[in-house]
Image: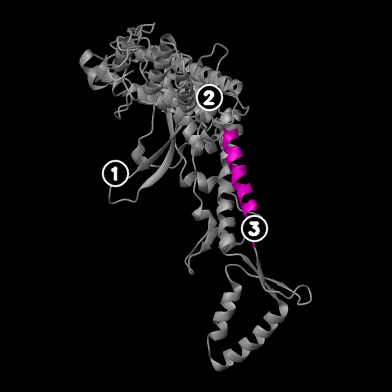
Amino acid sequence: MANIKTRKHSIYRIRMVQIMRNCLAVSGGRPYIDARLQRAPNETDVSWFGSTSDGIVGRRERACLVNDAGRISSKINQYLFKTKATRKGANEDWINDVSGEGRSVDGFMEDVSSALTSGGWCWLQVDRNPQQFDEAGNPIGYTLESAKENPVRWRLWGALDVTDWHIDDDGEIRWLITRTFKRIDADPNKDPVSTFIYTLYHKEADGNVYVTESAQKNVPELKLRTRQIIPGLKRVPFVLVGRISAEPWWFDDVENIQCQILNLDSLHNETLVDGVYPQLIVPRSILTALDVELKLEQANGKEKVKIQRELIKGRNSPLFEDGEDRGITRYIQPSAGDLAQIINEANRKRGLLFDMAGLSLFNKETRMVQTAESKQFDQLDTNSTLGNRALILQHAEKRLVELSKMFDGTFSEYEPIYPTKFDVVDTQALASSLGTISNLPDVPPSMRKILLRAALRIVKEVGGCDDDSYNEVLKDIEAMPDKKEPELPDPFKGRKGEDDD
């Protein structure tokens, strides 16, 4: 048998670096900055790393991240799971903890969606504790009581967690290798040991599925072994979600632009600092005179010239020019227009980032300059993207339910149904338009009912009411008369007062 600790699929090798960047982008924070912040050409070590002895913090440590990529991933999940999927017939206790760690099925599928966004594919596993055997070596069947104590569990494996695999022409997974980080620290008297555990799930000629474990390091406490999962199980208990491909994934472009924005923002901050501490230009004649004076003062043991030299040195080493060039001590620094150009470019790239994700309606910076046609197109693109993702998750969960029934005959089968129709609206622009229309001088009552329905929709979209309140108010709107009630005649109109002539 080949060494499962070193095997890597060819597609895995091609995609692993970019997928790792995508996963870091979704999580954000310092790990992503450390991985993607780029050192500028000719940047000094003090500028990049800082100086511990002088208490100077380098640019690498000062950089911060506006995590637009993570925002895109969370926005997809917010719209996908705004309306919960229906799971008629499912066991409620199990639905609230499908992972064994308190993760509900909705939370688990949100994690699946995030893994799809960053990697393009992921793997889902159905498992439970190993089969027990009696003294004679015969398998002990699972009873209803044992099923409650040892329920089926679902587990998510990201694209980087499964290093190699084989899928036959019928689409069945014949074998795959998972990688898990393990820390052994149960004994406080021993130093902890960290290692990766590689597990091969393989279907053999007898039709049964076996598990073979191997560790990166020799750790006796792990008790690695080869075992059969469950007698009679004829399928490797994994479900592939998404499409495995060596081609670039759309989130690659999102991450690459976020990388550019990160570096632009960091350099812009440095430019602002350089603007506060401009670059000094000193005539050589002054430097020569200062050197002579410095030697004299050092001989007398005084600190005056040392302070003067530090003032001339400033934040960075100054530029020196010959006296006949200009002979003027001065500062050079970027203009306000140059500084604005950097931030404008960062904003432009941030708009492109959201356009690539098909979620332009979430971008406040570009929302007001879009035409009506582009807004409609973006809305259709967003709704289509969400609907397609919902169908993928629905199919994946359905296959997990089928696998769970193979593990546990008492498992409560159900068919998940995800909402596939999404109506993503630009609430800010819609509210502004409604306000303009409602202020028209002659709006008929029937038109006002339409405006009230649209306004109610905005209130619900921003979380201002629940479904019951929405339906109640909608009934009140529908009950309003379509025609304006005729005004009663004024009985005093046209009559003369007592003081009139």
| Amino acid under disc 1 | Ala
Near-viewer residue (313 or 451) = 451
> Disc 3 marks which amino acid?
Pro
N-terminal of the pair, mark 3 or mark 1, is 1
Q: How is the image coloured?
A: one colour
- Name the secondary structure under disc 2: strand
- In this rendering, is residue 7 above or below 141? below
Which stretch is magenta?
A: 333-353
- What's the distance in space between the residues labelled 2 and 1, CA to CA? 33 Å
Residue under numbered circle 3: 334
Disc number placed over residue 186 in the picture, else none: 1
- Residue at (48%, 69%) from the top-left corner? 53
- Name which quarter of the figure residue 447 lies in: top left
Residue, disc 2: 165
User: Residue 154 or 320: which is nearer the viewer?
Assistant: 320
State yes or no: discs 2 and 3 in contact (Cβ < 8 Å): no
Cα distance, mark 3 to mark 1?
Answer: 59 Å
Which element is circle 3 on?
loop
